[in-house]
Image (cartoon, rainbow, N blue to C red):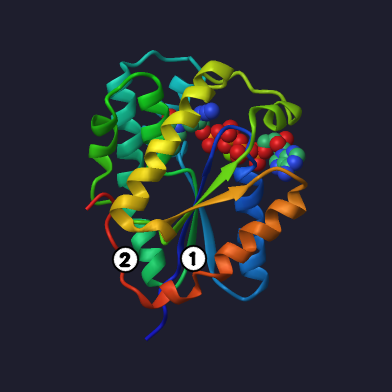
Amino acid sequence: MVNRGLFIVLEGLDRSGKSTQVSRLHDQLEQDGHKARIQKFPDRITAIGKMIDSYLRSEAELDDRAVHLLFSANRWECCQAIEQSLQDGVTVIADRYAFSGIAFSAAKGLPFDFCASPDIGLPLPDVTLYLTVSPAAAAKRAAYGTERYEQVDLQNRVREQFKLVADKVRTMHGPDRWVEVDAEGSIDQVWERIWSQVKAIESKKGEQIHRLWT
Ligand code: Z5A
Ligand code: MG
């Protein structure tokens, strides 16, 4: 039987370097002869993703709960393809996932449990690598863009919510499912930390896929 692919999620605050490291991980896996693909959330290409995109760029106004559910629906519409890839032996690297969904919406004031519930039953990542970077270090990177959530106050509240998300993952799914990675230092230094974590979960390829928040 062919081993399934790994499901790896990178999470973190704005400018923690997720997309940079996701792309590097993808390239390294392919170079090593593994099949891998990137799944970015939000996936702005789908019909739902286009609604999210115009909301983030402040071209459309939406109720907080409505947009929260759209982010979740955007994951559900990609879920079958993710599971198929994993079965086909393709490693899926997600750039953000349901954890961003909770952290951002709860930071806006929605109840935490409301934020978690629409994602119950999605595929559970083998590991979520949470990239940590201090506000001071983040400020030295490229400036915030112009999207709706790119504001210091909100990002600080998101940071607090991510701590609660981490607790929930560790309690419900085990401590090894949520790993903090120090994202300060050079891109190469961060990459070394990520790569050592990815190598540590090789054995999960023999395990069945579990469900989020169950
Ligand atoms: N959102 C939500 O509300 N609900 C949900 O369910 C989901 C998302 C899934 C858009 O996300 C917004 O959607 C997001 C959360 C919300 N809002 N915010 N904020 P996005 O993923 O599309 O956002 P983005 O535009 O890709 O930004 P980002 O992901 O936050 O950035 P990043 O991927 O972490 O960083 P990066 O692009 O790799 O790097 C940023 C810059 O730093 C860049 O110039 C790099 O060259 C530089 N960089 C990277 N690493 C380093 C190191 N090590 N040293 C120095 N400089 C570095
Ligand atoms: Mg990014």
| Residue drawn at (31%, 16%) of the image | 63
Which of pointers 1 and 2 lies earlier in the amino acid sequence?
1
Which secondary structure, mark 1?
strand
Q: In this rendered view, identify the residue nearer to me: 160 or 121.
A: 160
Q: Is 133 situated left or right of 179 in this image?
A: right
Q: Is 14 situated left or right of 212 in this image?
A: right
Q: In this rendered view, identify the residue nearer to me: 29 or 57.
A: 29
Question: Looking at the rendering, which quadrant does residue 126 occupy?
Answer: bottom left
Residue at which label 2 appears: 209
Above/below status of 194 relative to 45? below
**Image mark for residue 113:** none
Question: Looking at the rendering, which quadrant does residue 165 occupy?
Answer: top left
Residue 205 spot, x, y in % from top left = 42, 74
Q: Label 2 sits on what residue type?
A: Ile
Question: Looking at the rendering, which quadrant does residue 88 occupy?
Answer: bottom left
Residue 112 spot, x, y in % from top left = 29, 30
The Cα–Cα distance between marks 1 and 2, rounded to whole angstroms, is 13 Å
Which secondary structure, mark 2?
loop
Residue 164 spot, x, y in % from top left = 38, 37
Q: Residues within 10 Å of mark 2 (few under 14, many from 20)?
A: some
Q: Is 150 situated left or right of 99 in this image?
A: right
Do residues under tags 1 and 2 come within 8 Å of each other at their CB atoms?
no
Quadrant showing the N terminus: bottom left
Above/below status of 206 relative to 20? below
Q: Label 1 sits on what residue type?
A: Thr
Q: In this rendered view, identify the residue nearer to me: 191 or 60.
A: 191
Residue 18 spot, x, y in % from top left = 60, 44
Q: Is residue 113 visible?
A: yes
Residue at which label 1 appears: 91
